[in-house]
Amino acid sequence: MCGIAGSINAPLDIPLLTKDLFHRGPDEQTTFAEDDLILHHHRLAILDIAGGKQPMHFEHLTIIFNGEIYNHLEVRAKYSFRCNTNSDTETILRAYDKLGAKCLDDFDGMFAFVIYDKKKKEIFIARDRAGKKPLYYYNDGKRFIFSSELGALNNQLSLQIDVEHLQQYVRMGYFYKSSTPYKNVWELPAGSYAYVSMQHPEIKVQRWWDIHSYYKQSSADDFNEALDKVDRLLHQAVKRRVESSDLEVGSFLSGGIDSGLVTAIAKSYNPALRTFTVSFDSEYDEAPLAKLVADRYQTHHSEIKISFDNLLNDVETILCNYGEPFFDSSAIPSYYVSREARKYLTVILNGDGGDEIFGGYRRYVPFAKYDFFKPGLFVKGLASTAHAVLPAPNSKKSKYNFVYRLADLASKKGLATYLSSTIDIFEDYEKYLKGDSNILDEVGRDFNCINSSSLSGLQKIMNLDFDNILAGNLLVKMDIATMAHSLEGRSPLLSKEVLEYVPSMPDKFKIAGRQTKYLLRKLAEKYLPAELINQPKRGFEIPLKKWVDGQLNPMIKDYILPAGAYCRNFVDASFLDNIWNRKVKVGDEKRAKMIWSLFALEVWHRKVYGKK
């Protein structure tokens, strides 16, 4: 796990770059320069500590690499590579030398890397299937500058704000695919690669992997065969992620079945396994459930008590780490648990991806029975009438909220249905948002491609969540939260083999009646205490309503209520004031989300963009 940066036709302030990326690679910092190319690497040494130094050279190729290739020894054996080190970095170099971009198909891992080809005078950049490891770049047709983090790019260049992308953020709660808050700055999308010429550093991105193609396949395995295969694949994935480290590997426990399964299997390959969970005083505290797993497998368990007493002092730092407005408030407990885990070890397993791959969200249940993206006129009319008269819910966990959201979904059509079913910040209040009416055109085109396909309603929303919420929000959250503390997070449920098998399973293996994640719950019966198996999806949850109305209320007020607040360029001022003063008919949860999204935007604008 590392941090990478570099440029073509542009100087870099290396001391400043080292300062900005030090947390991603505190063990070693190295710079390679040749002609108009600069490659800068920060190393967090985990595998082949002595032999894995970067930049690494092989023949006419030079690489800087952020991530891990967990099956790299299998790749070596497959192609009979005779290597000089035990480093997965060397495996990538030799595989690229032999296969070019096709080498990506063989890799099970998380990665963002850059390879310089001295003969062709070009660089090759690539990211992993799910987008666990980030890669941002600035390109104006003459200069090409890249980095693992947006903040580092912002400090190297005089960047200008891309207002349309910020309008997308306000509406959606995250930046869509390659978008960032800056002009001429993009994120290389998940499952993509590109070549960049040294002479003409323009970029043309190509997709090398797309989960949609696996949703279009249909597995012939019956339920028991699928259950056994998933069991084998999870063992393979966890084993690779435990054994491909020269350092101790621990596990996060959130009290759910995803992290519980990962922990149970990991204990088979690391008898001295350490586990960590968050505990705090709220109705959602899952520490007791996590402890059941820890006790069953006799792990060395740490329960991290979070009181949020220091949140007022920490919240700006946590939000600024992202280098862009970041809406997901669960970044806060993720930050704290990562900080505590790093006191004990450097590598941690998690259950990321389980909900998006196996069907873990409650909103998936109705989509398993009816394609809400294409509602009939009768259903739409009936739902619109019901939604208009029902009062807004105040608790997102209530049964009433589920019914209310269901009526809301059925009353909408197309992309609006998807936005309402997921993060749901300003949906139904779009008229109070400022900006161009076409800001979601690209999002709509991509949505229509999925919606017009032959996939079922459940497959559509899971496909969309993988491409959007997982890549654009959840994996970003965990990358920054862990790497802020030089901690590497590994996600077995996002292994190559799992991603290329589970989407092809029948819908009924994922949602059975009202039961989410059906197959994984059945597998959990083999490994986990019964008390966990039928628990609803929660994860590391936080009391956002209490923060907005209590501890953080004065700070948020000082940020978003002044007449000159930047966030007021995106939301009607009177509407914002009315939301703050509870003069708008909206549920407490949704109100808190609206306010928090604008607070995150304002913190970014003042503390990150405006600090220079």
Image (cartoon, rainbow, N blue to C red):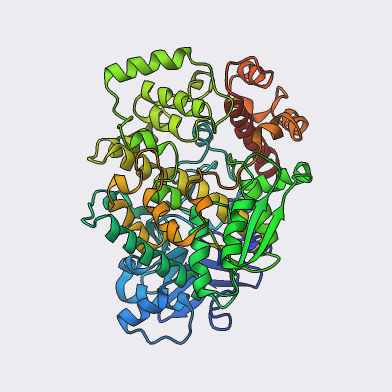
Front residue of 50/545: it is 545
Q: Is residue 285 above or below residue 410?
A: below
Residue 72 location, quadrant: bottom left
Residue 36 seen from this side: no
Q: Is residue 83 above or below residue 592?
A: below
x and y, in percent, of residue 160 in the image: 57, 41
For residue 94, which quarter of the picture? bottom left
Q: Furthest-front residue in view?
A: 530
Q: Position of residue 605 (x, y in %)?
A: 65, 38
What residue is drawn where x is 42% and y is 55%? 130
- In this view of the protein, which residue sits in the foreground, 420 or 597? 420
Residue 202 vs 109, above or below: the answer is above
Left or right: where 557 falls relative to 12: right
**Circle count:** 0
174 relative to 452 in the view: left or right: right
User: Residue at the location (42% across, 68% down)?
Assistant: 235
> Which image quadrant: the N terminus?
bottom right
Counting from the top left corner in percent of width and height, residue 509 is at 32, 49
Residue 25 horizontal/vertical position (percent)? 62, 67
In this orientation, does residue 424 appear?
Answer: yes
Q: Nearer the viewer, residue 273 or 528?
A: 528
